[in-house]
Image (tube, coloured by chain):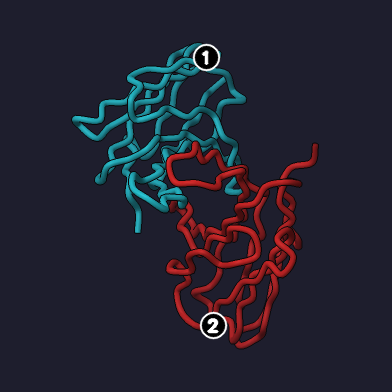
Amino acid sequence: SQQGEEDPQALSIQEGENATMNCSYKTSINNLQWYRQNSGRGLVHLILIRSNEREKHSGRLRVTLDTSKKSSSLLITASRAADTASYFCATDASGAGSYQLTFGKGTKLSVIP
Amino acid sequence: GAGVSQTPSNKVTEKGKYVELRCDPISGHTALYWYRQSLGQGPEFLIYFQGTGAADDSGLPNDRFFAVRPEGSVSTLKIQRTERGDSAVYLCASSLYTLAGDVNEQFFGPGTRLTVL
């Protein structure tokens, strides 16, 4: 079953604009990760934020986490055509033995040159 | 070093046939995962190995699906009597994860696209 829901399902922007994607989840988590997927194949890990962190940066990426609202956002600044891909949030659940990642359905981002 | 590799990259088979999908994890990663991704969906968990043992196979959809990891490295996902509904991309991931509470960053392979005609 899918834990998270990304919003929007699809996003189209001009190159140079910022892109914001949101993710909501249902259960308590240890951490939340964002992945990128090109052409429906392998996923590339972008950034991980722990449940006790509120914001994290990596290059042009900024992730926020609000555990009270069970939501996260991914901001890509100064987007490039190469950022065109699907973006997924994945949660790593709390509790002993947590190991599997539970993914949302993804946001399909199109960056128009 | 090398990332996670999966073979074949594409597999086309006929309904009712048996298929094997292979995953080579990153060297030294003790944890290995199989996920399945249907069109327009996120990956869904199938099975998790810690070393040679299947620590959790609760995501396998039915008993036609089976996976092994006999030496704690390479894993094979086996699907018997394939059905059209099994068509999907099968993703393998590995990580250094060993204990609950560890940061579990999973590294994914490129996937095998299975098409059942």
The residue under the point 33% across, 30% down is A22
- SS label for mark 2: loop
Q: What residue type is labelled 2?
A: Arg
Residue at the extreme left of the image, as rendered: A68
The residue indicated by pointer 2 is B64
Q: Is mark 1 on a helix, strand or loop?
A: loop
Relative placement, left or right, of A9 versus B61 is left
Asked whether the residues under marks 1 and 2 belong to the same chain, the reply is no
| Viewer-proximal residue among A95 and B114 | A95
The quadrant of the image that shows the C terminus of chain B is bottom right
In the rendered image, residue A110, in percent from the top left (x then y), is placed at: 50, 30
Residue B105, picture quadrant = top right
Visible in this render: residue B89? Answer: no
Left or right of B44? Residue B18 is: right
Q: Do the residues labelled 1 and 2 touch (CB within 8 Å)?
A: no
Q: The red chain is which one?
A: B
Left or right side of A94 for B79: right
Q: Is residue B11 visible?
A: yes
Q: Pick the quarter of the image with the N terminus of chain B.
A: top right
Within-10-Å neighbours for mark 1: few <14, some 14–19, many 20+ = few
Q: Give the residue number, with chain letter if any, for mark 1.
A: A60
Spot occupied by residue B75 in the image (x, y as percentages of width and height):
69, 64
Label disc, if present, on residue A85 of the rendered structure? none
Residue at image coords 53%, 60%: B48
Is the residue B75 above or below the residue B42 in the image? below
Q: Which chain is cyan?
A: A
Left or right, residue A90 beside residue B32? left
